[in-house]
Image: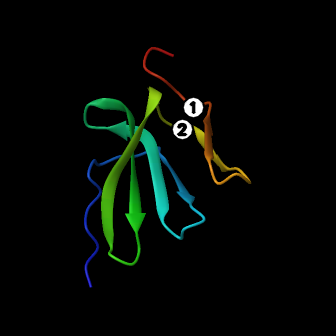
Amino acid sequence: MAIDNMTEERSSHTTTLLNSGKVLATAGYGYTGFLDSSEIFDPSTRQWTPAGKLSSPRSSHTATMLQSGKVLITGGERQGS
C-alpha cells in the first residue's frame, strides 16, 4: 500500500508523534526557502494533510511534545539569521 507524498517537500524539519498516533511534520527548508507550514500524517489513511503555520519560517529547530498535548517549537535557523 502506497503512502501519499507530503503536501510540500521539506528537509531539516521536525516530526513529532502526537497522542492521536498521527505524526506532525513542522517547518524546515523547501524549494522556496525556509518554511512556516506544517502537515499531519495519518497512518490509518496513509495521507498527509496541511496543518497550521508557524509565526516565522524556520529549519533545524526542535519540537517537544508537552503534557498538554501541544507541541513546542523553538530555536533553529531563520531567513537572514
Q: Do residues under tags 1 and 2 come within 8 Å of each other at their CB atoms?
A: yes
The answer to which of 57 and 66 lies nearer the viewer is 66
* Residue on which the image places disc 1: 76
Residue lying furthest right: 67
Viewed as shown, does residue 53 lie left or right of 67?
left
**Residue that label 2 marks:** 60
Position of 56 with respect to 8 (left or right) is right
How many numbered marks appear?
A: 2
Question: Residue 11: x, y in percent?
Answer: 40, 46
Q: Mark 2: few, some, or many residues within 10 Å (few <14, many ≥20)? A: some
Residue 34: percent from the left, percent from the top?
A: 38, 30
Q: Is mark 2 on a helix, strand or loop?
A: loop
Residue 29 placement: quadrant: top left
Q: In this view, does 42 lie above or below 58?
A: below
Q: Distance between the residues labelled 1 and 2?
A: 5 Å
Q: Residue furthest top?
A: 80
Residue at horizontal 71 percent and vertical 50 percent from the top = 66
For image coordinates 41% across by 57% down, the residue present is 40
Which residue is rendered at x = 32% and y = 75% of the image?
Answer: 45
> Residue shown at 64%/54% (left/top)?
69
20 on left or right of 35: right
